[in-house]
Image (cartoon, rainbow, N blue to C red):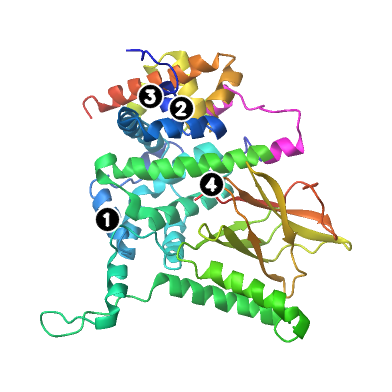
Amino acid sequence: MGRSEARPFTGPAADVRQLPDTDLGAFLGEVAKGDQAAFEAVCARTAATVFGVVRSVVRDPFQAEEVCQEVLLEVWRCASRFRPGRGSAMAWVTTIAHRRAVDRVRAERRLAEREQRATAHTIAYDEVAEAVQARLDRERVRRCLGSLTELQRESVTLAYYGGYTFREVSGLLGVAEGTVKTRMRDGLIRLRDCLGAGR
Amino acid sequence: MRPRRPEPHTLAGAYAMDAVAGADRARFERHLARCPACTRELAELREATARLAGAAAAEPPAGLIQRAVASATRTPQLPAAPRPAERWRRRRGHQPRTRTGRRPAPPRPALRARLALALAAVFLAVAAASGAIAFTTEHQLGAAALRDHQIAQVMTARDAVMLTARARPGGTATVVMSHRYRSLVLTTAGLPPLPAGHRYEVWLMGPSGDRAAGLLPAPHGGMTSPVIATGLATGDSIALTVAPAGGSPQPESTPVLMLSLTA
């Protein structure tokens, strides 16, 4: 898998038009009834985020596109399982996207390990962080990530954008598994509080 | 506010980021099922991860949405509690009239039927191209009929899902999968021809191990007629390898294609 080829990323993603999350849940409700126009509306509101998170994890642009297709189809197929009371529609969609992306990247890593059993993880934190930093277009998220402790930030970044398990993160960072687990949780709680304040 | 009980509650953060795999994940999910506090916490943490996702937003590739919408028209949906389509099907026997006395508008053709039709057309074309229909001899009919029945079952299953993937050396594979029947049907188009004495072999790979699922038939017009793989297990991926013509007990080469079947 090409890791560091120049991606056709067009600078700061300020021009990415992301329609607001409002109505997304209502549209999902219509999608659940088989409404294709509503599905198109859901896609229009989520495609940039879905593609962004999938590409962060999967890295290979071609595979990212394939995974995005699967994610959007899963949204179509499973729309009836969305429960508005249990969280936002965007969180429901991004959970699907991230899980699909992680599944794909882990299958790829298994393949790579079959190919060359020795070199397990050559991708270090810096590489993941660098790729992600280039894309973090939301100032608030960047600032909130910056407010975490270094270990919290590294753990969250490697897990979420790198697609690594907490055990792998522990190995990559050379930190005890128990510590990584709690840093992930503490880091996300802190992020949530930081992001939630004055939204 | 460190919890008194470090295990397995502390995994909520890692789990919210899909950073818990295998047995760890199964254990945490068991815990989650009987821990309403964890479920609430998880929902809150996922709002944070959604923001991490949003921060990575990028211009999607051209045509992504159009292709998704086009695929959706061929993909059946999971039923909600009472679905309008099902209510209609249930009362089809007595055709109720609306208050104005007219019959209710007919629902759009069932997606499942459309999926089956579209796929049947593709598969018939493949079968005709490969001569399967013309040259089926009588003693083959038993096994072939059983196989065709299984294939039809998967293709018309209520939960059928279609996935496509491109192979590394070129060509595509199309998979129609049914969790209900724990089976999938695979066709390929445009895979590069192999040297003599070699065939493409289908594998199911996952936590339950690697299982050979048969050899792809020889292509006709670049397409292979459908093969069925049964006994799907959770977490499986489907893979294609290049194998000696007789097949191999273990996948010996790097798969030319691998597709996660996780729903």
Mark 4 and mark 2: span between their CA atoms? Answer: 23 Å
| Residue under label 3 | A188
Question: Mark 3 and mark 4 in contact (Cβ < 8 Å)?
Answer: no
Mark 1 and mark 4: span between their CA atoms? Answer: 27 Å
Give the foreground label among 2 and 3. Answer: 2
User: Of marks 1 and 4, which one's residue comes earlier in the chain?
Assistant: 1
Q: Within 10 angstroms of label 4, few (less than 14), some, or many (20 or more) residues?
A: many
Q: Look at 41% across and 41% down and name the residue there.
A: A95
Q: Secondary structure at mark 2?
A: helix
Mark 4 and mark 3: span between their CA atoms? Answer: 25 Å
Q: Look at 45% across and 45% down and name the residue there.
A: A51
Q: Look at 72% across and 81% down and name the residue there.
A: B141
The foreground one among B5 and A56 is B5
Image: magenta residue range: A111-128
Q: Within 10 angstroms of label 3, few (less than 14), some, or many (20 or more) residues?
A: many
The foreground one among B259 and B83 is B83
Mark 3 and mark 1: span between their CA atoms? Answer: 29 Å
| Residue under label 1 | A29
| Residue under label 2 | B14
